[in-house]
Each structure stands twice: as structure tokens, then as C-alpha cells.
Amino acid sequence: MNRRERVWQAIHHQETDFVPYNFHAVPGVWQKVCRHYGLTDTHEAMEFIGNHIVKVGSDFNYNPWADEVGRVELTVSGGPVHTALDSEGGLHRDEFGCLWDRTGSLPHPVAYPLAEKPDLHGYTFPDPYRQGRFDQARELADRYRGEVFLFGKLGMALFERAWSIRGMTQLLMDMVERPEFVEELLDRILTEWNLPIIDQQLALGVDGFYFADDWGSKTGLIFSPRMWRRFIKPRLAVMYQRCREAGVVVAQHSDGAVGVLFPDLIEIGLQVFNPLSPSVMDPPTVKAQYGDRLCFYGGIDVERTLPFGTPEEVRGEMRHMAELMGRGGGYILQSSHTILDDVPLANLVAYIEEVRQMAGLT
């Protein structure tokens, strides 16, 4: 059984020789790992660790065609500030016109193209068929196809893409005051961007498709289930159906306490949910309620255990989650979110050595 087959069996709720796993981290962490083990690059590190999953596609908030350096004027309290804008750091404008501050580990938006007016007249979506868009994805897929489980990916799939165009506060108000505008915006995201992007990645021969769209906070949904069912669910169902008809696995990433949506997601075809986050959902409970219908992906706490625990605590949590969630299949072990630079090297080594031991690589 190779890594691809192990993931496939786990997703379809069959027990495997050991639970499939992944190591998922920001570039700075990968560099730290490479230095510690004397590895040349991330590809070599992935093979050393024994990662089971590779995602192909483009960055969710990055314009791959932006190679020029310019200046941008932002209005802040006290007056305008001129700031460098380039593709390597600082402020970066994505293909949809949203301006991101990329100076930290996790980019955050600072300006939105339709912030002033809920009007799509004159707004142009990027060309999803632009030549070269999936060249790197194709190379990555060709490199790993058949050996690991390949996910196509679409970040900021609906809600996040809409608020990155309109602004979070404005979009939430629009859902109540201007629902027709929200419907039009989401329909255009679906038809003019999402479906063409999905189709092109399906053509690469992926095994599954991984959608990312955050709907939750620590305590619940950002907006009501009724709103989600009106604006998000029917369009998500179209995307899931496109993938299921192509014979690939459907996975969804959504941060926060979104468990109330699990029955709806299962209804429209979801098979894998990420992240399993112990800080917002109880692993034994979700395993008991949904473990026969959803494969959970995540589970190793990035908020407490990895940054603040001891190496022994990291390894103990990994063993516990593998035993609890892996029973009967339906589990892929990974950190509950991207591992950040705040995780000590000793805990990174503990994570890596534990999964290598599980896989018999030591």
C-alpha cells in the first residue's frame, strides 16, 4: 500500500496499517526543518517526513503575474500614507483587486475594490484561462501523481472571495440589506472563476479537490445558518457536484465552530473535513456523530500543544489522536492548522520523528 492508497482507504472509512499523515507549515518552518536535517529543499523534506498529501493550484491571495514594484496610497487616520507595493513583500494586490499586507506569516487584507459601492457594473473578473496559470500545478501533479494523494485546491471559494472584493463588514450588511447584490456577486464568482478553475485542475488528474472558505469564529458561525443556506450552500453544491461527477474526493476547509453545518455539507456531497480543531470541536464527539460519513483531517493542536507543549506532550497527543480518530478509518493526521514560526524546533522534531516512527521510516 503506497501513500495515495492509504489516504484513499482512510477517506472511504477503511482501517489502514497506520493512519495517513501530513506535515503542513509556513515556509519559515520548512526552512528550519531543512536546516536541522540537512535537507536541500521542501520536496526532499516532504519525502523524508513521508507526507501523504500534495495540494496543487495557485495561492489564494497572490497575483502570480505581479512582478512590478510600485507605490500605493492608503488613507489612514491622519492622512494618506505612501507604501511600497511589490510581489515579494509589503503590500500586494491580488488578481481581484484586494490589497493584502504580506509582511507577516499570514497575510491580511487592507483595502477592497468594491468597498465604496455595492455595484458590479464595470468590475472585471480575472481570466481563469490565462496561459501559464497552471504550469507549476501541472509540474507538481506530474511529479507526485500515483505516489501521494493529489488535491486540487480553491482557496477563498465563495464567502471569503466575496468579502475580499466587497469588505467583510460591508458584505455582512449586504446579506441583510442588499441580498440581490450578494447573489449576483456569488454567482459571478461561481461561474466566471470557480468552475473554470475546478475544471482545469480536474484535467490535471487530481485525486480530490480541496475547497477553503472560512465561515466560523471560536464560538459559532460568522453569520446565521439560514444565511449560509441561502447564499453559500446552493453554490457550494454545484462545485461539489462538479467534482463528484469527475470521480474525485471532495474536501472542505473551514475554520471555526462550524459543526452545525456538517449535516448540510454531508447532504451535498462532502467527504473530508479540515481542520479538526480541538479548540473549537470535541474530537470524540464529532467522531461518534459523523465519523461514518466524514473523514476528519487535522487534530494536532497548533494553539496550545505545538507552540507551548513539551516534545513528549506533542508525541502523546499525536498517538492519542491516531488511536481515537483512526479507529475504523476516516482520519488523516495533521496539525489543526498551518504550523507557524512560533513552534519550537524541539516540537517540530517530535512531530516529525513520531510520524516517521508510525510509518516505519526510522
Image (cartoon, rainbow, N blue to C red):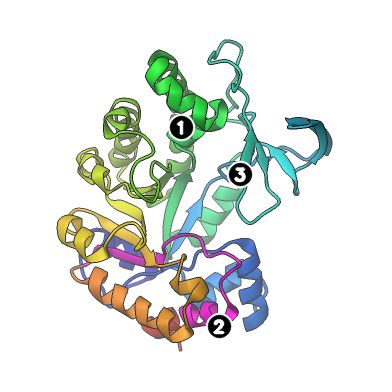
Q: Secondary structure at mark 1?
A: helix
Give the number of the disc on residue 108: 3
Classify 10 Å Cα crowding around label 3: few (below 14), some (14-19), many (20 and above): some
Q: Secondary structure at mark 2?
A: helix
Amino acid type at mark 1? Asn
Residue 206, x across and y down, in percent:
42, 50
- Left or right placement of residue 296 versus residue 124 in this view: left
Q: Which comes before the other along the chain, label 1 or label 3? A: 3
Classify 10 Å Cα crowding around label 2: few (below 14), some (14-19), many (20 and above): some
Q: How many marks?
A: 3
Determine which residue is flagged by label 2.
346
Q: For the point 24% across and 44% down, which residue is it? A: 260
Residue 228, x across and y down, in percent:
32, 32
The answer to if 335 sits in the magenta stretch is: yes
- Left or right placement of residue 101 versus residue 355 in this view: right
The answer to if 19 sits in the magenta stretch is: no
Amino acid type at mark 3? His
Nearest the viewer among 357 and 343 is 343
Q: Which comes before the other along the chain, label 2 or label 1? A: 1
